[in-house]
Image (tube, rainbow, N blue to C red):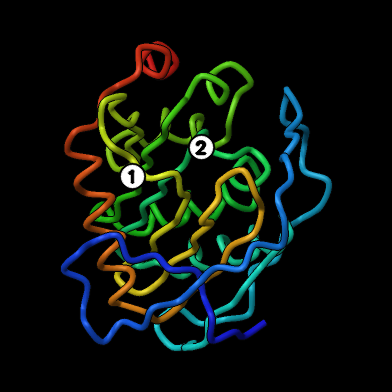
């Protein structure tokens, strides 16, 4: 699924000049109808067969299972830090036993490992239950979940960062489609700056605080 034309993810005016201008061609608009209550896993997910820090090609995806396979590959191979920037902790992507297991192994591998999750709205995840929320209660010292500040000028995008090399990005969060990169420090650096700036102004949601107590 290699494609030289990837969605543009440069949001910083100081982006490296060598970074090529690229466009995202949407497969079409449609609404993602998630179930009100996340259902149990129907089958075990397998990670995409690409190596973090080595695979150079862009990998495009259009289906939920493909997105989860790339997310799982990045989560399983990260060695230091993970960041998730999400609208509502998408149950179709992250509420899965394979994702939870990968995050658990990552967090237990070293006390220095850290997973940060920045969410626009945690209401649904708290109300319906979510595996990563449950995990945050067990491993609260190095798994942190915060809510985007309502006045922060956030971009309508969803992404996952793995160390300083891997990126999974969906330019339009209401769609499944997006792309994954396993060795692109420049684009990861731009998204990391975006994440850190939003994190610095983030807040703790009262619903989330109650859930974690």
- Which image quarter is the C terminus in? top left
The residue at the point 46 percent across, 42 percent down is 86
Q: Quadrant of residue 174?
A: top right
Q: Is residue 6 left or right of residue 113?
A: right
Q: Quadrant of residue 46?
A: bottom right
The location of residue 10, given as percent across then percent down, is 33, 66
Tag 1 residue: 116
Most extreme residue toward the right is: 42
The location of residue 203, given as percent across then percent down, is 25, 25
Disc 2 on helix, strand or loop? helix
Disc 1 on helix, strand or loop? strand
Instruction: Give me the C-alpha separation between circle 2 and circle 1.
Output: 11 Å
Check the image and report above or below for 204 versus 158. above
Crowding at mark 2 (Cα within 10 Å: few <14, some 14-19, many 20+): many
Check the image and report above or below for 147 versus 20. above
Q: Is residue 10 left or right of residue 27?
A: left
The location of residue 182, given as percent across then percent down, is 46, 77
Check the image and report above or below for 40 versus 126. below
- In this orientation, which residue lies closer to the viewer: 87 or 14? 14
Label total for image = 2
The residue at the point 27 percent across, 59 percent down is 192
- Which image quarter is the N terminus in? bottom right
Tag 2 residue: 132
Q: Is residue 207 left or right of residue 175?
A: left
């Amino acid at each position: 699924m290699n494609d030289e034309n990837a969605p543009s993810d440069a949001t910083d005016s100081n982006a490296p000049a060598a970074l090529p201008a690229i466009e995202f061609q949407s497969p079409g608009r449609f609404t993602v109808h998630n179930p009100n209550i996340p259902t149990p896993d129907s089958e075990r997910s397998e990670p995409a067969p690409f190596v973090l820090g080595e695979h150079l090609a862009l990998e495009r995806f259009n289906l939920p299972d493909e997105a989860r396979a790339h997310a799982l590959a990045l989560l399983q191979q990260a060695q230091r830090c993970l960041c998730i920037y999400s609208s509502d902790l998408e149950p179709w992507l992250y509420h899965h036993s394979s994702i939870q297991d990968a995050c658990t192994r990552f967090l237990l591998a070293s006390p220095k490992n850290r997973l940060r999750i920045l969410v626009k709205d945690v209401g649904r995840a708290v109300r319906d239950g979510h595996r990563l929320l449950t995990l945050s209660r067990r491993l609260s010292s190095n798994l942190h979940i915060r809510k985007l500040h309502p006045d922060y000028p956030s971009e309508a995008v969803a992404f996952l960062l793995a160390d300083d090399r891997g990126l999974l990005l969906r330019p339009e969060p209401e769609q499944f489609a997006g792309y994954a990169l396993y060795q692109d420090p420049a684009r990861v650096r731009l998204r990391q700056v975006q994440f850190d700036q939003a994190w610095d102004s983030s807040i703790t949601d009262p619903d989330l605080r109650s859930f974690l107590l």
